[in-house]
């Protein structure tokens, strides 16, 4: 029951019967069976299926490659096919097609541990959030000896990080808050607080807007520049995740049983795509 954006307009879901459904722009659907219900992709080489702790790499033709068990991982946005992953103490950059364990980019101190991480769109740095609620910006440049660029205290404990590809800004999901963090100035720009918990956050493809999905099923779209609310859409029952469609016309809301495509101009649900259960 996971919604993921793949590439070129494709998106995917995994139902609890362990079937991954890859919805392609051509309206065709590719179904692959996995033992663990999870799928994610951020480059055009392959996607990953499994759980947060275990995964396998697959090409878009379904060929299986590697198996791994990191605590946290992300596919890099680069065509090199590298994977960013960590245990509780270290963050590594690893190529699944090689036997090497990868290079260490970041290590925590003493009893601290890594909670989440995100790769920058241009691949030059990594954001690592630790248990003490600090945002660590870490360089991926192999020529740089001191990898840590800065370490700043956050307002809360982020469970998701998304980075604006056109500006040095990140959105941090922190319970009932979304913190807008300026990555160049290393300080919080604004904290948006909501009456209920936030389930999901994502930028639009052009990075001019971002969407916030609340626990009551309401979706709110904000201007990414001035942070004003542009539009609010009616609650979707059992909503779990929300993303912008690549064409920018729709919001795609996943309920675990179906995808609802909400027309951003009319606020109407134009399409409902059922998920196999």
Image (cartoon, helix red, strand yellow):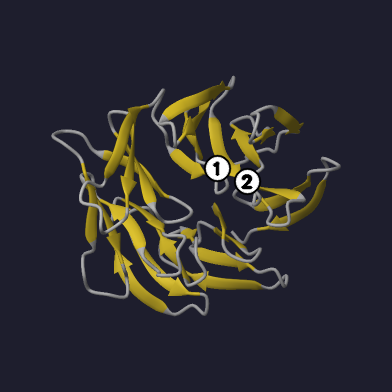
Q: Work out whether 143 lies above or below 155.
A: below
Residue at x 55% of width, y 44% of height: 164
Instruction: State the SS at label 1.
Output: loop
Residue 130, horizontal then vertical, whole percent: 29, 36
Question: 230 or 24: nearer the eye?
Answer: 230
Circle 1 residues within 10 Å: few <14, some 14–19, many ≥20: some
Q: How much space separates mark 2 and mark 1, taking CA atoms?
A: 8 Å
Q: Quadrant of the C terminus?
A: bottom right
Instruction: State the SS at label 2.
Output: loop
User: Which residue, given by chain and number where applicable, does mark 1 sit on?
Assistant: 167
Of all residues shown, which one is farthest toward the front? 143
Give the side of residue 87 with respect to residue 3, left or right.
left
Question: 39 or 171: nearer the eye?
Answer: 171
Give the side of residue 141 with respect to residue 51, left or right.
left
User: Which residue, given by chain and number where applicable, does mark 2 sit on?
Assistant: 207
Residue 224, horizontal then vertical, whole percent: 63, 36
């Amino acid at each position: 029951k996971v919604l993921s954006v793949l590439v070129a307009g494709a998106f995917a879901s995994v139902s609890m019967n362990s079937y991954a459904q890859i919805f392609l722009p051509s309206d065709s659907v590719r179904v692959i069976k996995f033992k663990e219900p999870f799928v994610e992709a951020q480059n055009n080489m392959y996607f990953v299926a499994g759980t947060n702790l275990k995964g396998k790499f697959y090409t878009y033709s379904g060929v299986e490659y590697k198996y791994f068990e990191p605590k946290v991982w992300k596919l890099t946005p680069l065509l090199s096919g590298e994977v960013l992953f960590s245990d509780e103490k270290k963050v590594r950059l690893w190529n699944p097609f090689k036997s090497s364990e990868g290079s260490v980019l970041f290590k925590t101190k003493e009893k601290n541990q890594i909670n989440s991480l995100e790769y920058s769109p241009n691949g030059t740095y990594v954001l690592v959030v630790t248990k003490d609620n600090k945002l660590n910006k870490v360089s991926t440049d192999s020529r740089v000896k001191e990898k840590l660029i800065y370490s700043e205290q956050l307002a809360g404990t982020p469970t998701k990080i998304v980075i604006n590809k056109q500006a040095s800004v990140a959105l941090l999901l922190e319970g009932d808050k979304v913190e807008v963090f300026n990555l160049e100035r290393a300080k919080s720009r604004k904290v948006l607080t909501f009456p209920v918990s936030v389930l999901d956050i994502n930028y639009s493809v052009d990075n001019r807007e971002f969407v916030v999905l609340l626990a009551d099923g309401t979706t709110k779209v904000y201007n990414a520049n001035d942070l004003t609310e542009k539009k609010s859409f009616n609650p979707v029952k059992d909503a779990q995740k929300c993303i912008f469609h690549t064409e920018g016309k729709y919001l795609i809301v996943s309920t675990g049983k179906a995808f609802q495509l909400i027309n951003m101009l009319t606020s109407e649900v134009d399409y409902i795509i059922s998920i196999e259960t």
